[in-house]
Amino acid sequence: MTDAPPPVLSADQARADDMLRHVLRGAGVDLDTGGITPLKESRSEVLAVTGKAGSGKTLLLAMISDALKKAGVDIISGDYEGRRRKDRRTFAILAPTNKAASVLRNRGVPATTIHRILYTPVYDPDYERIAEWLAGEGERPEIDGMSDEALDRAHAFYQTNSSIPGALAAAGLRGSDFITGWKRREEPLDIGMVDESSMLDKRQFEDLQEIFPTLILFGDPAQLAPVQQSGEMVFDALPEKRIVHLSRIHRQEADNPILDLAHMLADPDLTFSDFEARIREAAAGDDRVVMAERVESSLMARSPVLVWRNATRIRLINAFRGAYGAPADALLPGEPLICDGIELPLKHRKKRIDLEARGLIKGAQVIYLGEGKRPGFSRLHVVGAPDPRVNVASIVKIEMPDEEEPFIPYAARMGATFLHGAACTIHKAQGSQWPEVQVFAPDLWAASKVGRMEAGQPLWKRLAYVAITRAETRLHWVIRNRLGRPAEALDTGDLDATPAPLSLIPEEGGA
């Protein structure tokens, strides 16, 4: 079986590819000859590859990833690293959230989250021997209570998936069996490549620069900058020679009307009414664009309606709960939530690391599965996480229209905090994609009337660009403030089956 021929690159993609190879060659990894030299600990270099949706950033990321693997550079996955060797060269592909990382993994790019690189798992010694064997760094172990058949299942899984936790799960183990805790990384790594880098704040950027002597950022300058960064993204501050921009937009084999609409927004003369007329034209000729008269509540259960204003978000969430007949004092299994952070005192720093490493970071999308075994605990499915089922001390807040204080159906004294996820702001949706996305157009019309500018462009156009490019296969442009009732009850049967859930509890009095 022969390898598929490499894709033909456009002029700007070839220029970016040359720059990436030049930077890596300077770091001691020559992708053209396969030559590798030991890591130079004193060097530090940052390069940014920028471009709008469809310009080829993910293509280049995948190509460089494949070339690094073929050159003998080991990938750091975030679940197990193996022994450090002086001559070993490594790279990691990172994304700010589990959802963003899972989008890359679905495209064949082995990505993990920034948190899973900042914090590393501590393995039980017995199971670390299995991990070393699977990674080719040790002999086949003999483990009390584990049969040869279980080891064979783990080995077979690892040959096709290269995941240590997945292999151990195939052997019948749970994450809590072999991961005893988490620790902050103390030693630097090697080469880091970060997708969705427009989402990075300055603190994250500084952390990554400390860990990776060679850091490559991939980002979309047309997206929204992190809140409180005055419209500036971290790569905007780099010297011009450290940024390579992809200016050409490449259509897919089947023309993509969603991307076409997104790129129309670059026209400085385009008004909001002009844009809606273009959407209507696209919807008339292609079912991948829908001019919707109402919000569909059934879609909200797995992909939030994207809005600009918080007041709109809260109204839609309460309408969604009413449509499904959710009780006033409880959640229904299948309701979507969004992690709003971790509320733990400093003495529980270890538990905070544990929660964050499992994917419960601010902005993470989760699905409620039911009450936990202890008061204030919830069983959750973390969307996009490799090991998605958790049982966590939680504080769930449901905001109410015209009320300053939220309604709280479940609350531990401390733990992970959640807001309802049937609707979310476009800012919080960055880095995520869903097969079908509903964009609440009345909010973008309101933004157009405000006349606000951000980084030299009307705010409504930036909002529309980000919202539209969250849709993978179908865009619903909702033009009326109406909600359609669901045809079926909420369910959790569509979620991936996983091993028994991890229990994430503060060490002292977490309930």
Image (cartoon, rainbow, N blue to C red):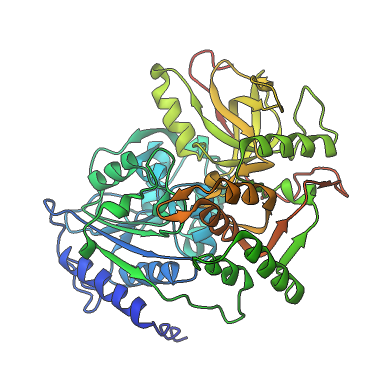
Q: Quadrant of residue 478?
A: bottom right
Residue 206 in the image: state x and y as whole percent: 27, 42
State left or right for residue 344 relative to residue 75. right
Task: Say if residue 63 shows up in the picture.
Answer: yes
Q: x and y percent of residue 492 in the render? A: 75, 44
Q: As displayed, is residue 464 above or below residue 59? A: above
From the top left corner, tell me how far across and down residue 145 is, in percent. Answer: 52, 39
Compared across the picture, whether 280 is left or right of 349 comes to right
User: Considering depth in this image, is 37 or 44 the residue closer to the camera?
Assistant: 44
Hey, which residue is sitting farthest top in the picture? 509
Q: Is residue 44 above or below residue 336?
A: below
Residue 452 locus on image (x, y percent): 50, 47
**466 sits to left or right of 126:** right
Residue 500 seen in the current view? no
Taking depth in this image into account, of 11 and 340 the one nearest to the observer is 11
Q: Is residue 253 above or below residue 476?
A: below
| Quadrant housing the C terminus | top right
Identity of the residue drawn at 60% across and 37% down: 338
Total number of numbered discs in the rendering: 0
Side of 332 relative to 30 (left or right): right
- The residue located at (15%, 65%) in the rendering is 37
